[in-house]
Image (cartoon, rainbow, N blue to C red):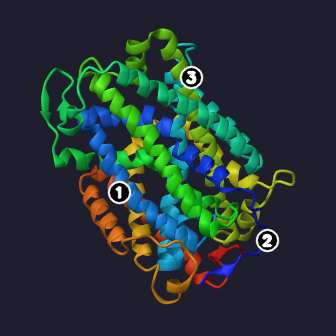
Amino acid sequence: MLKQSPTPALSRVLGLFAAVMLTLSCITPASSLFIIVPEVLAGQGSGAVLALLAGLVVSIGIGCCYAELGTLTPSSGGEYAMVGRLLGRLAGWITFGLSVSLLVVIPPIIALGTADYLADLVQVDRPLAGAAVMLLATLLAVLDVRSNALITGIFLGVEVLAAAIVAWLGFTHAERGADVLISPVVPDGAGGLSAFTLAVLVAGLTVTMFSFNGFGSAVYLAEEIKEPRRNVARAVFWSLGLAAAVIVVPAAAAVLGVGSLDDLVNKSFPDYVRAWGGDGLAVAVNLGIVVAIMNAVLVMALQNARVLFASGRDRAWPEAVNQALTRLHPRWGSPWVATLVIGLPGVAMAALLEIEELLGLTSVIICLVSILLAAAALRARSGAHRSAPAWRMPLWPAVPVLVIAALAYALTEQDPKDLLIAAGIVAVFAAYHLLYLRPRSGTRWIVTTPED
């Protein structure tokens, strides 16, 4: 049963526009476009747009689950608070374990791309550049949330401009008709072509979903958003729609504008831009990509800290840890200890590990968390939840059922090693629940939600 939140509490200072800007920055559509979409183009060829649209459709279904559950349970705990309320303590804690794994791993994965896009101006060691971006973003995230909303809004404008330039160049240098998007083929990188099949689409579904991932982070800001039971859902859908435009349109332009479809396998967006607009424009777009990466990591550090703060407030750890994680900065009102705890490991990971190899694992974890959310959404209209104030998705329960079916099928196409690692994460957190939280159920893991 959810109880009202004790102090300390975050302040409600974010309107809808600021919430959308922060959430959209967490999706980091330009970072997805320039870092993740090239993998989609290489694997799905001219079918990349169809693959992205399939990922978008599934993401909309997941967004419905986030919107309904996030307005039913407006807590900075995000997924774990929503699943815990609907499916019970153990399911909520496992969801937390999967979510916090993503929160630690995804930012350094994105930060490591910085050096690649600075190469035209300066040669920087990739791990060093990634660690520097992680550290700067973590320190900025300690500032108050309104200041970060302004910073991320400026950065977001720069990255959207870079994506718009790519789209314009691609369409104005089109080498083929739009029919290639509807009847796609997959190049092999050596001049050969193969058919784009349903199996090819499904194999890339988790990665295309990853491209849009982050729209659910609106729920992490639920305790700082004004009128959360209305504005959380709006932030989810506005940010997802805007991100789709920034990602899908330039991807379509790239398919139409590259000199050869083999370039989708062998080259990347900087190569396309250099061919279309010359070296100067390529350098400018690359700097826009660096800004997008910085923006992504900053917002993730900001929002990830809210989840860790909530876990301390909900007393998931020994008391000394709980007190540290809920400590707010005296000037900026931010959970500064939680920010450092969630951000600094990413600095070390970027500097020391081949963390990009974990991209497949992150996609698997996103699928598992989304399945848990969809399962929780199936219970969101039972008992007392039926009359609770919340945004309600259309076509319920068909939407969560279809989400579960699509993601379960997608998981069957993933690397068994990634599935085993995800299973190991579940086992570790389940053991912590069994050995520490369950024997102390009266004093630990008391999931809370603030007063509206």
Q: CA distance from mark 2 to mark 1?
A: 38 Å
Residue at image coords 56%, 26%: 288
Find out whether the residues at labels 2 and 1 contact each other: C-beta distance under 8 Å. no
Residue 264 visible in the shown view? yes
Give the left or right position of residue 266, taking residue 286 as reference: left
Furthest toward the bottom, the residue is 383
Give coordinates of residue 316: x percent, y percent. Answer: 63, 70
Q: CA distance from mark 3 to mark 1?
A: 32 Å
- Residue 380's place in the image compared with 137, above or below, is below
Where disc 3 sits, the SS reads helix
Mark 1 highlights which residue? 58
- Residue 319's place in the image compared with 332, above or below, is below
Q: Earlier in the sequence, mark 3 or mark 1?
A: 1
Give the left or right position of residue 30, taking residue 228 as reference: left
Q: Quadrant of the N terminus?
A: bottom right
Give coordinates of residue 329: x percent, y percent. Answer: 82, 54
Mark 2 highlights which residue? 7
